[in-house]
Image (cartoon, grey):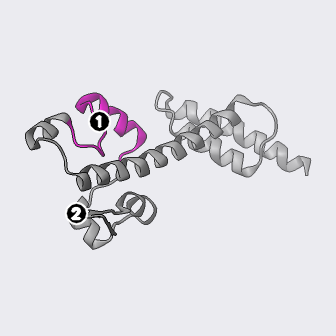
Amino acid sequence: MFDDQVQLSDHVFDRHFDGKVMPQDAAMHGTGRNLSLEEMAAYTEHHRHLPTIKGREEWQAKGGFGLGDITNQLWATTETQALYITDLNKRLDGLAVLAGTGPIDHSQFVAAKAAIANMGTLNEAEKAVLVQGCAARLAAQATKH
């Protein structure tokens, strides 16, 4: 989409929700993938800039970025950050379920199971114990009805 000489693309959301981008966007933005939250954190620590924003070295080499280029970088960054916020919110929902002790419904079980799967500091046996505990709480909810 063009506006004031700026071509915008929804390649971030297309890649996330559809698993691919339109051919014209792939030619411009590549066929890579969106980074996970953990990958993004590692990238920023190593490169000292967001993966969706060109770094200081490229800025200096090019003498800055054009309006269209920086607009696209910020557009992609905003969409990427929205995906990270959604991911973090889901993880928090799962952790909230884990912090409780009462019966849970199916959606809460799914959230807790996803949060457990993302717990990189736990081994598979520890994760299984947590999932089993949530499954028992789900079963308790089912027997209440």
Residue 114 lies within the magenta run: no
Residue 53 lies within the magenta run: yes
Q: Quadrant of the N terminus?
A: bottom left
Q: For the residue marked with disc 2, what is the amino acid?
A: Met
Q: Residues within 10 Å of mark 1 (few under 14, many from 20)?
A: some
Vertical comparison of 11 with 44: above or below: below
Which residue lies most toward the front here?
A: 4
Query: x%, y% of residue 128?
Result: 59, 37
Which residue lies most toward the left here?
A: 61
Task: Identify the residue at horizontal 12%, vertical 36% (top origin).
Answer: 60
Vertical comparison of 27 with 105: above or below: below
Q: Magenta residues?
A: 35-55
Which residue is identified by label 1?
43
SS at badge 2 = helix
123 horizontally vs 98: left or right: left
Q: Is residue 34 visible?
A: no
Query: x%, y% of residue 11?
Result: 35, 61
Q: For the residue marked with disc 1, what is the amino acid?
A: Tyr
Q: CA distance from mark 2 to mark 1?
A: 22 Å
User: Which labelled disc corresponds to residue 28?
Assistant: 2
Which residue lies most toward the right here?
A: 145
Query: Pointer 2 and pointer 1: residues touching (CB < 8 Å)?
Result: no
Q: Is residue 115 visible?
A: yes
Task: Identify the residue at horizontal 46%, vertical 32% (top origin).
Answer: 120
User: Which labelled disc corresponds to residue 107?
Assistant: none
Task: Identify the residue at horizontal 26%, vertical 65% (top origin).
Answer: 26
Q: Closer to the N terminus: mark 2 or mark 1?
A: 2
| Residue closest to the eye, 95 or 134 | 95
Vertical comparison of 95 with 73: above or below: above
